[in-house]
Amino acid sequence: MKLYSTNDRNKLVTFREAVLKGISKDGGLFMPVSLPKMPDAFFERINILDMQDIAFAVSRTLLKEEIPDYDMFGIIRRAFTFTAPLVNLGKDKYVLELFHGPTLAFKDFGARFLAETLSYFNKDENKELVILVATSGDTGSAVANGFHNVPGVKVVLLYPSGKVSRIQEQQLTTLGGNVTALEILGNFDDCQRMVKQAFADNELTSKVRISSANSINIARLLPQSFYYHYAYSQVEDRDKDVVFSVPSGNFGNLTGGLFAKEMGLPVHKFIAAVNTNDIFPQYLKTGEFKPKASVQTISNAMDVGNPSNFARISSLFQGSVANVKDVIYSRSYTDDQTKNAINEVNNRYGYLIDPHGAVGYMALNDYLNENPGLYSSIVLETAHPAKFKDIVEKSSGTAVTVPKNLEQCLNKEKRSIVLPNEYEALKNILL
Ligand SMILES: *Cc1c(COP(=O)(O)O)cnc(C)c1O
């Protein structure tokens, strides 16, 4: 696969280079030059394929020139140890549960595929690779889980002391093995600054190989296209038009869906569901992309004021807002509406949905009301409701069952190294 930078269409890199670099030197994001169509036979017999079959079929179509089938098969088998069931709410309305991975959020798909491909491309290096991640919660634990026990790789996480939820802190600090959690006496910006300083420190980088497993890495996006195919494989009537509602923040999940469509998945519309951070629906309305400071909400994984994948979406549609609008519909919702929606989904369907999924549910209903027709409509449920237990229970009046692996994680002993918010302290640890 050849990729260009969204800042320069003419300089191409291989998938290997794109994965190892993360971001282009010119500051642009890597995008595939073209996405091949999956063969008709794939869609004709898609209903008999499972998540791993689909992941393998799509990834070999994209990457067979760089990763031989045998190795790709191993990558897929190790990355996707869990599946993505489609739950039928009735009347062709579905929820795609993306929270069955180890950290109970959809980021496990991207983080685990990235971990496997990065360690695959790293295997000929004889020096250990240190993955350095500043996290305000969910991304860090998905990345750490993905790299947990991967040979030749060490993970160092920095998180702001007292500023992540208890569940998040337990997920960050109880892995052990090759994962070290640094509890920084400061805020998230301090953590990020310290990591940036490490990458800019020539003395350090000459002694230690560090990489960032960044959220904009192309290896996190590709696997986010697999479960759109898998959702389609599970709908009852594949002759109906399919619409996907995607709770969105940085728009990586939605970009994965656009890749699936480019590869031939028959998607009628994507619905970009956002909270009060409404940059994207405003862009569709006015044609102007105006990033803002983010606002805190109860669907906090979508509190993004400058969606990082906008550059990719824009380049995929040749910078034309009219082209984007043909494929993507978008609406924004407040926290009060979100709480009501959690309650409504429980009353109507007996299904407990998390705040992110609830935003997706509302946007789907608005789309269906404005565009009557016969659809198979699918809400992507991006996190397990137990991760937002208090809000879900308060909004629905119903108890949330905590999954076993989360329960176990909550009972484990927390292990972190407390550090001041000074770069020298981090450097000493890394050396
Ligand atoms: C990260 C995240 C999102 C937003 O996904 P993007 O790819 O950034 O749009 C939505 N829901 C949950 C639970 C998340 O963790």
Image (tube, rainbow, N blue to C red):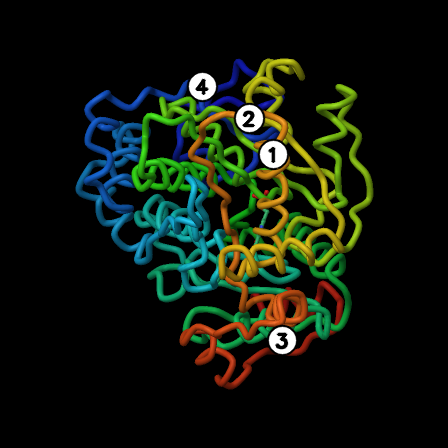
Q: Name the residue under label 4.
A: 33
Give me the disc on residue 309: 1
**Residue 411 vs residue 339: left or right?**
left
Q: In which quarter of the image is the C terminus?
A: bottom right
Q: Quadrant of the N terminus?
A: top left
Give me the disc on residue 166: 3
Q: Which of marks 3 and 2 is nearer the N terminus?
A: 3
- Mark 3 to mark 2 CA distance (whole Å): 43 Å
Residue 411 showing in the rendered view: yes
Determine whether the beta carbon of the residue marked 4 sits less than 8 angstroms from the nearest atom of ligand 1.
no
- Mark 3 to mark 1 CA distance (whole Å): 29 Å
Residue type for callout 3: Arg
Determine whether the beta carbon of the residue marked 2 sits less than 8 angstroms from the nearest atom of ligand 1.
no
Give me the disc on residue 372: 2
Image location of residue 382, percent across then percent down = 52, 52
Tell me whether circle 3 and circle 1 mark residues in contact (CB < 8 Å): no
